[in-house]
Image (tube, rainbow, N blue to C red):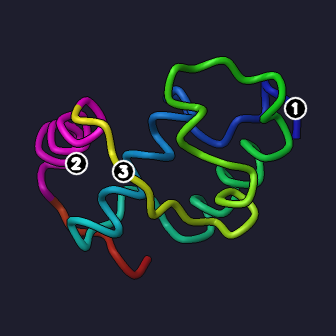
Amino acid sequence: MTPTDCPTKYNPVPFYLMCSYAYYQLDESFMTDHEFDMLAKWLLENYDNIEHSHKKLVSKDDLRAGTYLGEYPDIVVQASMIYRDRILGNKNTKGN
């Protein structure tokens, strides 16, 4: 995968964190497990070329495991809630 093959139209680092927050803290999913795995794979393959202030929160080991169990910045928490309520209309898609 190349940078143009990113599996999300959103900025991949914060969206990865938002999806992790939704899954582990809200018990909801913003994407299927397969889509999340593809995002983790893309981030891992492009990690050294990605610049984002929250990149330091997500390690290559997190991406290899396809998980994130660290601390979530307030902006990620708030963005997750807004995404869930405004974009998804508070629909729970876990298990897809």
Q: Position of residue 24 (x, y in %)?
A: 33, 69
Q: Are marks 1 and 3 in contact (CB under 8 Å)?
A: no
Q: Position of residue 76 (x, y in %)?
A: 30, 37
Answer with the quarter of the image where residue 95 lies: bottom left
Real-space Cα distance between discs 2 and 1? 28 Å
From the viewer's perspective, tell me whether residue 30 is left or right of residue 82: right
Residue at numbered disc 1: 2
Residue 83 lies in the magenta-colored region: yes
| Residue neighbourhood size for the residue with mark 2, other residues' Cα within 10 Å, grouped as few (<14), some (14–19), many (≥20) | few
Answer with the quarter of the image where residue 69 lies: bottom left
Real-space Cα distance between discs 2 and 3? 24 Å
| Residue neighbourhood size for the residue with mark 1, other residues' Cα within 10 Å, grouped as few (<14), some (14–19), many (≥20) | few
| Residue neighbourhood size for the residue with mark 3, other residues' Cα within 10 Å, grouped as few (<14), some (14–19), many (≥20) | few
Q: Position of residue 55 (x, y in %)?
A: 59, 32
Residue at numbered disc 3: 71
The one of 22 and 86 positioned closer to us in this rendering: 22
Q: Position of residue 52 (x, y in %)?
A: 57, 20
What is the magenta range? Answer: 75-90
From the viewer's perspective, tell me whether residue 20 is left or right of residue 94: right
From the viewer's perspective, tell me whether residue 43 is left or right of residue 74: right
Which type of secondary structure does the marked residue at label 1 adopt? loop
Residue at image x 12%, y 55%? 90
Residue at image x 42%, y 58%? 20
**Amino acid type for the residue under numbered disc 2:** Leu
Residue at numbered disc 2: 88
Q: Quadrant of the N terminus?
A: top right
**Amino acid type for the residue under numbered disc 1:** Thr
The one of 81 and 5 positioned closer to us in this rendering: 81
